[in-house]
Amino acid sequence: MTAPRIFFYVQHLLGIGHIARASRIANALVKDGFDVTVVTGGLPVPGFPGDGVKTVALPAVVASNAGFSGLADADGRPAGEEFLNARRDLLLEAFHAARPDVVIIEAFPFGRRQMRFELLPLLAAIDTAEPRPKLLSSVRDILQENRKAGRDAETAALVRAHFDAVLVHGDPGFIRLEDTFPLTAEIADRLRYTGLVAAPPAPEPSETFDIIASAGGGAVGAALIGAAKEAAALLPADLRWLLIAGPNLPEADFAALSQDVAPNVTLVRFRKDFPSLLLGAKVSISQAGYNTVGDLLRSQCRAILIPFVAGGETEQTVRAERLLALDLADILPETGLTSGHVKEAVEKALAAPGRGAVSLDLDGAEKTAGIIRSMLTGN
């Protein structure tokens, strides 16, 4: 028998969280025997998608501002109609060439409204394909709140009209979709909870640091890393710090951070072994993105979370507050963050007792593969 074919669309606009989560799912699907094509629409990210995954890279678009209100090309120019039409055509060509059994669209229709210029034509192509592939939405456990009037109804209508299932990548014991999507009852029959898509348990670290400050993709992390660097100078010099600025931090910001780095501080853009390093660290300072939190939950590291709130973002704050309630993290505000705030939080974390094991389901990538296989076989 030929392997079932998966066509997986993922568009990251600012950070790397969406492509990282989608890549973990794609890798699990490959290991489960699926033939997987991942269509990416953002800037390239080293290491994603992983080995064994076919890729189609559309001409990249990014968010033109932190509020995600516009699209720009890879050079920062506004993405015009001709550019977007060409992208749409390439996506449709890739879909017809792949002839998939299953199409997965990451985030849409719960997010990525900016991509309707190509995703609505893709839905139409799926609906008229012979045989029609199953269509799944792949969505994280916490949605952005404060959506405009009518958006939730529009989302629910699209799900009911086009999607066979919604893969919710979360543990319902931690948070349920209805906590951030009021019309969940209208699509309840489509929901499939997969567990959190965390990286597999990491090997022991190749080196150890006491405190790791990380900014995810780095596009908006300069203040966090800067405050951590200054806090290191206020704390004992025998503490080893690792500052991971992120691959997307603007070069000028990275150059500024590289000035006058103390001997006990290591500054890098990216560490592929970040999950391993957390196993050996005492304290982590980071935003509260989905993937970073998954890595933290795999470790015993004390977490200080600084949720991203620019442009009215609420998702990271909701996640951080749930973790605080479970005594799995402390929180610092992004607005007005100072080195003094970071110093005090690190001192508190270093004095805190070790954290116990986490009971949340972290095997969402593998369970996603199992759910899709059961949908295809009817079992």
Image (cartoon, grey):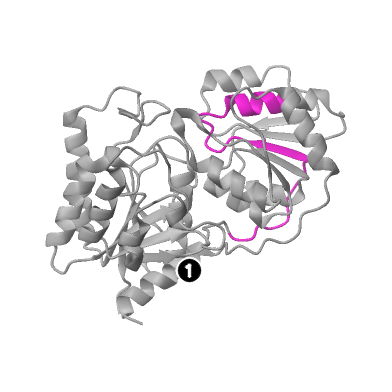
Magenta-highlighted residues: 200-229
Residue 285 rendering spot, x and y as whole percentages: 68, 38
Q: Residue at the location (43% across, 59% down)? A: 168
Q: Quadrant of residue 5?
A: bottom left
In this picture, residue 281 sits left or right of residue 170: right
Quarter that holds the C terminus = bottom left
Chief SS of the magenta region: loop
User: How many numbered markers are drawn?
Assistant: 1
Q: Residue at the location (15% across, 55% down)? A: 125
Q: Quadrant of residue 130?
A: bottom left
| 326 within the magenta span | no
Residue found farthest to the bottom: 379
Q: Residue at the location (56% across, 63% down)? A: 173
Residue 71 rendering spot, x and y as whole percentages: 31, 30
Using the rendered image of the protein, determine whether residue 50 is visible from the camera's viewpoint: no
Residue 342 rendering spot, x and y as whole percentages: 73, 30
In this picture, residue 329 sits left or right of residue 28: right
| 202 within the magenta span | yes
Q: Secondary structure at mark 1?
A: helix
Residue 115 rendering spot, x and y as whole percentages: 27, 40
> Is 284 situated above or below 220?
below
In this picture, residue 306 sits left or right of residue 260: left
Q: Residue at the location (60% across, 44% down)? A: 320
Q: Which residue is mark 1?
A: 367
**10 Å crowding of disc 1: few (<14), some (14-19), many (20+):** many
**Amino acid type of the residue that numbered disc 1 sits on in the rendered structure:** Lys
Using the rendered image of the protein, determine whether residue 267 is visible from the camera's viewpoint: yes
In this picture, residue 124 sits left or right of residue 298: left
Quarter that holds the N terminus = bottom left
